[in-house]
Amino acid sequence: MEDLTVILNGIDQGETGTADRLLPLVYGELRKLAAAKMARESNQTLQPTALVHEAWLRLGGPLQPSWENRAHFFASAAEAMRRILIERARRCQAQRHGGGLRRVDVDDPAIAIASPGRDEELLAVHESLDRLAHHDARKAELVKLRYFVGLTLDQAAEVLGVAVPTAKRDWTYARAWLFKDISQSRPS
């Protein structure tokens, strides 16, 4: 770490090229610091390496400011990492990013719409499908083609004259809508 002090002094004195030698020297320690910070955070998708690189850029990248000493540098790096993690957590909690709602897999059997074998479920799907038709006729038609006729998603998209990605989105929405509607209309 004596080299670190020399490099930090060189940066302070304005010596050229010293900032380029700083990152390789402190990288391992910064990565340990990043890993420790991230271990205390839940639901982090950012990798320690990415956190180190983002913090390095926030600290000035190749244009490093004047550092008093090693402790000053690492304290600033730790603060930069903390701010990055907080900003990411706030972004994830923002309403436009789901705002605390949990992601649900629409292919999960727990939210699958009824199979046509059971009369009670068939009637529930039918009644709910009528309500969906009032809400969005195209999505209701897609469900009829898939559920009652047995067409594949590609075939149903072709019949409806929409792109397959549109049909996929409509199918996802319709399944979730029907599940919610059927769940709410069932007696408790």
Image (tube, rainbow, N blue to C red):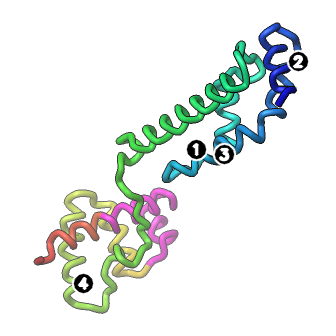
- Asked whether 152 or 159 is in front, the reply is 152
- Asked whether 3 or 56 is in front, the reply is 3
Residue 124 locus on image (x, y percent): 20, 79
Residue 94 locus on image (x, y percent): 38, 40
> Image quadrant for the N terminus?
top right
Tell me, for residue 17, which label it has, or none.
2
From the image, state whether disc 4 or disc 3 is nearer to you. 3
Query: In the rendered image of this protein, does residue 185 appear above or below residue 122?
Result: above
Whichever of labels 4 and 1 marks the residue nearer the N terminus, that label is 1
Q: Main secondary structure of the magenta part?
A: helix
Residue type beneath disc 4: Leu
Q: Residue at x 73, y 25 (%)?
A: 70
Residue type beneath disc 3: Pro
Magenta residues span 151-176
Whichever of labels 2 and 3 marks the residue nearer the N terminus, that label is 2
From the image, state whether disc 4 or disc 2 is nearer to you. 2
Q: CA distance from mark 4 to mark 1?
A: 52 Å
Query: In the rendered image of this protein, does residue 119 appear above or below residue 124?
Result: below
